[in-house]
Amino acid sequence: MTQNTLVKLIDLAQRYPDDPVIMCGLAEAYAQNRDFMKASSLYRKLIQLKPDYPAAYGELGKMLALSRKTREAIPIIQKGIEVAETAGDLQALKNMKAFLGRLEKSIPPRKAFRPSTVSLPKRG
């Protein structure tokens, strides 16, 4: 993505702030430039604008995962799966289920809390 293209997309987004196509294009441009925070912000806004758009959840989940926020990405992807099922978007459903599986496998299990075996000196 060239800087010129990014500037044009930013200009379009400023002129048409609620246009989902422009918002998606700009978010993709930010993602290509590895600015996952800005891309995430746009995908969140897109979800607010079009909560029935499954791809926005999938892309937000990817941006969060790329930002090393895997635990935050999982519920977003799960919600996207629900939205895709409701919308009948089989391709988005398939993609997000596969991505969710990879995310869940990438998280190490949390260690159970174990009380300290070190005994404290008695006061007295």
Image (spheres, helix red, strand yellow):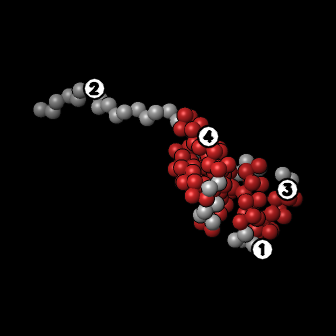
The residue drawn where x is 23% and y is 29% is: 120
Helix, strand or loop at label 3? It is helix
Helix, strand or loop at label 2? It is loop
- Which residue position is annotated with label 3? 3
User: Closer to the observer: label 4 or label 3?
Assistant: 4
Direction from residue 50 to residue 110 in the image, left or right? left
The residue drawn where x is 23% and y is 26% is: 119
Amino acid type of the residue that numbered disc 3 sits on in the rendered structure: Gln
- Which residue position is annotated with label 2? 118
Mark 3 and mark 4 in contact (Cβ < 8 Å)?
Answer: no
Query: From the viewer's perspective, is residue 2 above or below residue 123?
Result: below
- The circle drawn on residue 15 is 1
Query: From the viewer's perspective, is residue 114 above or below residue 47?
Result: above
- Which residue position is annotated with label 4? 98
Separation of marks 3 and 2 at Cα, in angstroms: 59 Å
Q: Earlier in the sequence, mark 4 or mark 2?
A: 4
Query: From the viewer's perspective, is residue 82 above or below residue 10?
Result: above
Q: Nearer the viewer, residue 51 or 16?
A: 51
Direction from residue 38 to residue 75 in the image, left or right? left
Direction from residue 20 to residue 79 in the image, left or right? left
The answer to whether residue 15 of the structure is visible from this angle is yes
Query: From the viewer's perspective, is residue 66 above or below residue 87?
Result: above
Helix, strand or loop at label 4? It is helix
Q: Earlier in the sequence, mark 3 or mark 1?
A: 3
Q: Quadrant of residue 14?
A: bottom right
